[in-house]
Amino acid sequence: MSAGTTLAPDERRLGAGAPIQDTKSDKIALACIYTALGLFCLAVLYPIVYVLSASVSNTKLVSAGEVWLWPVGFTLDAYKAILDYKSIVSGFGNSVFYAVAGALVATILTLLAAYPLSRKGLPGKGIIMAAFVFTMMFSGGLIPTYLVVHELGLLNTRWAMILPTALAVWNVIITRTYFMVTIPEELVEAGKVDGCSDFGFFWRVVLPLSKPIIAVNLLFYAVGSWNSFFNALIYLTNEHLFPLQVILRQILLQTKVDPSQMADTSKLAQMQELQQQLKYSLIVIGMIPPLLVYPFVQKHFVKGAMIGSLKG
């Protein structure tokens, strides 16, 4: 076969031998796999496209069920109305703060907990790890947790949305495994020979080599904080501290708009008319931050998640 000859997509080569074509059963299996993946993608993408289309369509046409895929009667009235609803604006800012601050605090704690557990010289490492795993299967429950938060004076503070869920044991396990795979003991010993302290080695060597797992933790914690609303329902009563998810939940459950939250009461009738469409626009706004962040950490995220799950 000449050097310029190209093989068909369904052909494979074994060494210098003749090309081997896929059998009929292989082609059927591939067709079934691609069909299943295509249907799965449609099942995921259609709700997103529908919500986006409904948020920019005419309110009456949406209520009449005439919006199936593409926008009908394009309008941005719902997004304009959001800017006049004070709780939505403050809730969005609160959610961004909780996601960013919560992800940073949780990632720092996870790295500081996982790295010592990945080293062989830590005394009682097995007992400490067993204590971590124990919390995954048994917890104190809602009432004891609430009492702890109350006694610490965290109720109705921003810390109530950050500290109680600041560490996920599963993330610690993944991060510990990543350190075990990528930071060998020989590298630690070489650092000690050069006079590097444990903290200096962690800061100068471990962290620069751990960008993938740091990206994994930041994304996991940020998305978890962004989607969290239960803690706000339990620990917060001050509406100025509510995250966007709680505001969205209130609008989805309520059948009317609170006039006190309107900056311009003359737009109250318009807001009530846009009530259905407002729900879709809020869902779109709630999806935007994770969708914007993920492309920037995708490369590190995939690598860190794969290495961190290789072995425990």
Image (cartoon, rainbow, N blue to C red):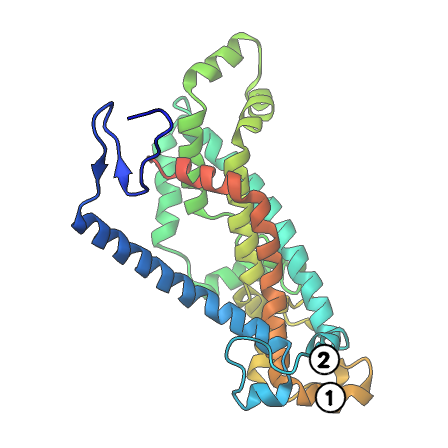
Report the residue marked by disc 1. 270
Amino acid type of the residue tagged 1 in the rendering: Gln
Quarter holding residue 244: bottom right
Contact between marks 1 and 2 (CB within 8 A): the answer is yes
Q: Position of residue 128 (x, y in %)?
A: 39, 36
Residue positioned 52% across, 56% down in the render: 224
Is 167 situated above or below 203? Answer: below
State left or right for residue 300 relative to residue 81: left
x, y percentage for residue 272? 68, 89
* Disc number placed over residue 241 in the picture, else none: none
- The tag earlier along the polypeptide, 1 or 2, is 2
Circle number at residue 77:
2
How busy is the neighbourhood of tag 1: few (under 14 within 10 Å), some, or many (20 plus)?
few
Q: Residue at x 49, y 60 (%)?
A: 145
Front-most of residues 145 and 18: 18
Q: Is residue 301 left or right of residue 208?
A: left
The alpha-carbon separation of the residues under discs 1 and 2 comes to: 9 Å
Number of marks present in the image shown: 2
Residue appearing at x 61%, y 61% in the figure: 288
Say which of 31 and 16 sits in front.
Answer: 16
